[in-house]
Amino acid sequence: MGERSVGLSLAKIDALPLALGSAAFTADIAPRGALVLRFRYSEQAHAEIRSIDASAALALPGVAAVFHHGNCPETLYTTAGQGHPEPSPYDYRLFDRRVRYVGDRVCMVAAESAEIADRALELIEIETEPLPALFDPESATEPGAPRLHPDEAHAVIPADYDPEHNVAARVEISIGDTAAGMEEADFVVTQRYTTHQAAHAALEPHVVACSLDARGRLTIVSATQVPFHARRITSRVLGIPLHRIRVIKPRIGGGFGAKQEVLLEPYAALATLRTGRSTVCELSRAETFVSTRTRHPMRVDLRTGVKNDGSITALEMDALMDTGAYGSHALTVLSNAGAKVLPLFNRIANLSFTGCSVYTNHPVGGAYRGYGATQGYFAFNQHIDTIARRLGVDVVEYCKQWHIREGETSPVFEALGEGKEGVSQTVESCALGECIDRGAAAIGWGEKRDRRTVVDGWVHGVGMAICMQGSGIPRIDMGGATMKLNEDGSFNLAVGATDLGTGSDTILVQIAAEALKVPPGKIEILSSDTDLTPFDVGAYASSTTYISGGAVLSCATQMATRMRAVGAAALGCPEKELVHEAERFRNGRTDEVISFEGIGYRTLYATAQEQLQTSASHTSDVSPPPFLAQFAEVAVDPETGDIRVVHFASAVDCGTAINPRLAEGQVEGAALNGISWALAEQFLFSAGGRLTNARYGRYGMFTAADAPPMTTMLVASHEPTGPYGAKSVAEIAINGPAPAIANAIYDAVGVRLVDLPLTPERIYRAIRAAGQP
């Protein structure tokens, strides 16, 4: 056990405290007697605030302060927790004189209790002037469209940002000559696809607690994916030195990208500084639906020229993304709709990607698992299925023929990254062909495709989708790790990486244990404390195992090297004679041994008198993609349009699975997330832009009880740039369910659904429109 940790399905190191309810989340450790922070939100989609009178609220006993645009910093910033300088525009203030969607923040009360705060919010008198609202992204750039950001909103990196025309981001690349490629084609397939807004629906809502320590420094405890970004952004917004802020991330009840936003930390910090009191802010479920962040809706137009031999001579992809009232992740999510999708078929000589993110008076989009690739793959995989059917070939064989392979590259890698030019790279690990074969076998593809078997009136069909993603953002993401040796041969590992419940703490311990040849129980990990742990960009972009894991591997390897030197001195032999074994070094010539405990005592108390500690950082010039094939079998009632997923299979290449059980859990969780989004989840708005189903009971999200039978397979490859051959796994499996199910619906009843969600109503109408009985 001491010699091997990687590849074992070890229990999560926090499994028992989570199961017993003893693990501490932010709300559990909020200071006693803290002031409660509550927000009042706009009831109008677009309006100017003419006046705010908080005198009655301030006179209410128990009210400590009221905050609004008239008494708060007016610093423009982005809530997107991204690296500096952020690729998202600076278009947001703590409180603004203009509100831009139903649910925008108008003011905040700090009070002794939630009840007092709510009463105080009701007493605040607000006068507004309604403005024309913009809900249609297709008309956002037209002359005469309401302008949402007429102030000094701006981009902080070189980017095509045009708020004068409601453009939050614009992207364009062109490779080859698509017009000539279309002329060369034997036929052209053109189709428009649309994907919809969605809530992250993490079990734990957004929550933050803030206090002042004995030296007057701010301590922010937050359910955040990005503690270091939260510190930096809070410092800038409030104009206080960064070193006067400490951010701690405790256990988190899910994030999925929503907690990559810095939505509460500056408010709690401001209230604590103004009042001198500890503060706590925990959003309600309705608030998280309306006033945090969502998946960006997107319209994707695909036009593809194809020869009769199946080769694609040209591909044009155009995406229009609704970023909502603010441009959080507007550039990078849009970019990923092309950057993570188009390299998959890498032998297309002529292709183009154009995209535009536009402002509307809808709730704000943000980071969401899949991050643009999910929207792009819904279009791409249906388009490929359509092409294969037009050619009269099996889409399984078509995908196996044309997908990117090990040792190959794509010009898209270099042309398009996340909001900027990308990085040239060669795929060094790819088992997608095997993923396709194993997934097809699991679903019974050969026996079920094009059969339209009827069972009790339900027509069955099967569909597939293939995807790739990435492992961190090359030349941007960085993770750090430090380690020290204790007397008993145990180690303390400190990492900035953020465990959202994914098990990344466990994964990083396994990587360190493997390098040191010790049991994982001999490593105590501390993560995500900006005072005590090294920098890490945070949990996003599928970076933790690959980037942070690389830092841990380097740190642990350095520790083993330093311990070897101590051991050699103790045994009086050259370092090269030592053999690294489980928890010890052995002289290969004399068989004398020194244990890690012996090295610990020698360094701290004997002749060496030194604390053995190491530190490492890790970045990467590449972002090795994991690969995935997903297959769905559905049953459709042609009389009602009702649909059931009978079986769902996922086969994923994530390189070496550091912990196979945790990797499978990530795949299954993401797949169910994608199935739910495809079939049931949707935002319903009133004519005035109010979200009318901001609660679980009406939102339509699947639970474990709704999960179909699922088969999950990890297909091994070895990524030479990853720790022990590992790549990412957490995001990719959300990308395939929607197109796989849509393709299966077509296989069952012969109708192509190009708009999400795939509800029974839409299926029924499509069947009737096709003239089927």
Image (cartoon, rainbow, N blue to C red):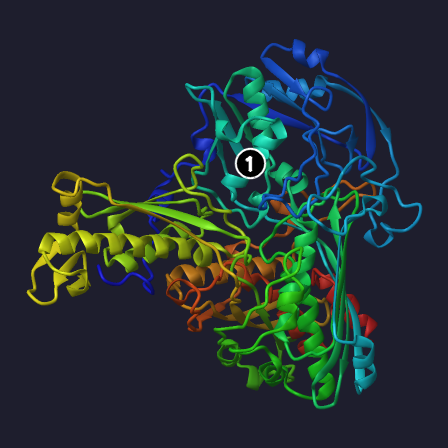
The residue at the point 50 percent across, 47 percent down is 538
Identify the image quadrant of residue 362: top right
Depth order, front residue of 727/113: 727
Residue 550 vertical placement versus 531 (above, below): below
Q: Quadrant of the C terminus?
A: bottom right
Residue 610 spot, x, y in % from top left: 21, 41
Q: Which residue lies furthest to the right in this view?
A: 144
Q: In which quarter of the image is the N terminus?
A: bottom left
Depth order, front residue of 427/431: 427
Depth order, front residue of 612/472: 612
Residue 106 vertical placement versus 296 (above, below): above
Secondary element under disc 1, as helix, strand or loop, is helix
The residue at the point 32 percent across, 63 percent down is 8
Residue 299 spot, x, y in % from top left: 76, 60
Residue 513 vertical placement versus 268 (above, below): below
Q: Residue furthest bottom?
A: 309
Residue 183 spot, x, y in % from top left: 83, 83
Residue 467 spot, x, y in % from top left: 58, 69
Identify the image quadrant of residue 674: bottom right
Left or right, 533 with respect to 377, comes to left
Depth order, front residue of 610/694: 610
**Residue assigned mark 1:** 232
Left or right, 614 with respect to 568, comes to right
